[in-house]
Image: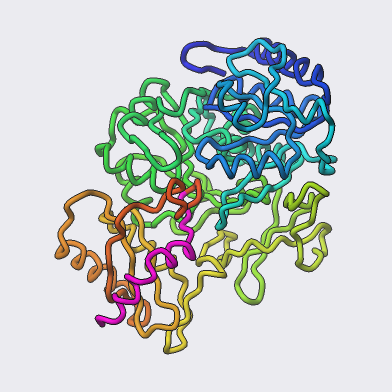
Amino acid sequence: MSSGAESWDKAALLKKISQVSEALLNRKNPKAPVGVLADNSLEWIAIDLATQEIGVTLIPLPSFFTPNQWLHAIKSSGMQAIFCPQEDVAKNLGFMFQNDYAGELKLFESMSVLSSIVDQPNLSEVQKITYTSGTTSEPKGVCLSTDQQWSVAQSLEQALRSLQIKKHLNVLPLSVLLENIAGVYTALACGVENTCVPLSEVGLHGSSNFDADACITAIEKYQAESIILLPQMLQAIVAKSTKQDPRLKSLKFVAVGGGKTPVALIKTAKSMGIPVYEGYGLSECASVVALNTPENERIGSVGKVLSNRNVRVSKDGEIEVKNVDLPHYLENPAGLTSTLTSTPSSAGGEWLPTGDLGHLDDEGFLYLDGRKKNVLITSFGRNISPEWPESLLLGSGLFKQAIVIGDGQAQLSALLVTSKDDVSDEAIQLAITSVNQDLPDYAQIGPWMLADEPFSPNNGLATANGRLKRDLIKNKFNNQIELLYART
């Protein structure tokens, strides 16, 4: 395990885990939940593993959350201590007392620890609460056990074993489950060297500002053999690299997930020599559910289901995942409430409705067809998943983001963010005309408009992994959308 500046072997990692564990057990309330609000580092990983070692619930706080979202997570989880590099940030969040712990991150305790006036939620068997930004201002906490998380890592180890990967580079925040489990845990399960550097070094600033040149430089510097990217990050790297780019020659496996990836983008990346493979996962399933690999690949699908999961498609087309270890949302400090409302599985456990529409082919490859709640019904009664034309728009390479609307309308329209500045209206229309040639008439794009800024977590119009908050976007641009249709 390396940070570029220093390396930890197994003994060094275990020593740090022991130090963290001792500091946590020396708190006034040693079993109370603890948070971490920090950049990627080796110490972050040691903190995570230490909480597993001593049975303490960890709450990773994404740096891109707003202060109100942090406070919501702190209050709802009953968190009574936090690892944080800056005292002023800790104080603003209500953590005043510094624990006697020697580390780059400081361990602050809350005043409520001393007064014991905060009711603790029942977090039995909950090792981690991962807060998803979701579609509202208040993030929801998904409660996971240690076994749930490592089950995913072990299944990924089996799926990727033949690649004999030796070096993984963390490119996404560790506070995001995808990197935490599919990255760090899987690297540990595979005996792979995990390189963890500050996010700025791999080009990620906040949640939506990505410097592809910096990321490519880091890949070359650390000779990374595997990385995990979001679709928009892959698009940026493709735009900044060349065919068979020597800076990327070390890569053996590039996983892309967090949102549907345009088929055209995957094909373009592969034609340039980037070994990219799409996957699919859910926080409620401790991240990855299905993944393409060199041995089992079908471009356009999200791959075959991992060995620790079973998947089925309901009569109305919704993907359901069998979960023996039931996931929960943390809804209030009084306790946990199960999210499962589906029917029991004949094989044990229950089926978790994902909210995603999809299908399985005869060979077991899983395909995503859109979000169930996003389906548009035109005035002619045609049901359309907007992700279908959106994927084609993004695949043109001209657009960084696209949202297709038209519920109750005779024609679909699009709200667009271009991938570069100064794109002419003629070029946009030409791209839309080209996309329409691959769509039936009822799913073709008619009027369009450009958004005045990208959709991002910073303005509340996208989640951390790039998923658009459709209702909020529609509300913000409602007047312009109405004028758009009025002119047609």
- The quadrant the C terminus occupies is bottom left
Which residue corresponds to the image point at 78% horizontal and 47% vertical from the top-left?
A: 333
Residue bounds of the magenta highlight: 466-488
Give the side of residue 402 with respect to residue 111, left or right.
Answer: left
- The quadrant the N terminus occupies is top right
Give the side of residue 35 with respect to residue 26, left or right.
Answer: left
Q: Main secondary structure of the magenta part?
A: helix
Instruction: Residue 417: give x, y in percent of width and height.
Output: 30, 56
Residue nearest the observer in this picture, 217 or 410: 410
Residue 359 painted magenta: no
Residue 396 higher or lower than 237, as above or below:
below
Please state the total of marks drawn on the protein image: 0
Instruction: Residue 352: give x, y in percent of width and height.
Output: 71, 60
Which residue corresponds to the image point at 48% horizontal and 53% vertical from the top-left?
A: 259
Instruction: Residue 356: give x, y in percent of width and height.
Output: 58, 64
Q: Give the colour scheme shown.
A: rainbow
Which residue corresponds to the image point at 34% horizontal and 30% vertical from the top-left?
A: 216
Residue 35 higher or lower than 65, as above or below:
above
Visible in this render: residue 453? yes
Instruction: Residue 14: give x, y in percent of width and height.
Output: 71, 15
Quadrant in the picture for residue 209: top left
Residue 246 higher or lower than 124, as above or below:
above
Which residue corresponds to the image point at 41% horizontal and 27% vertical from the top-left?
A: 200
The residue furthest bottom is 380
Visible in this render: residue 146? no
Residue 469 painted magenta: yes
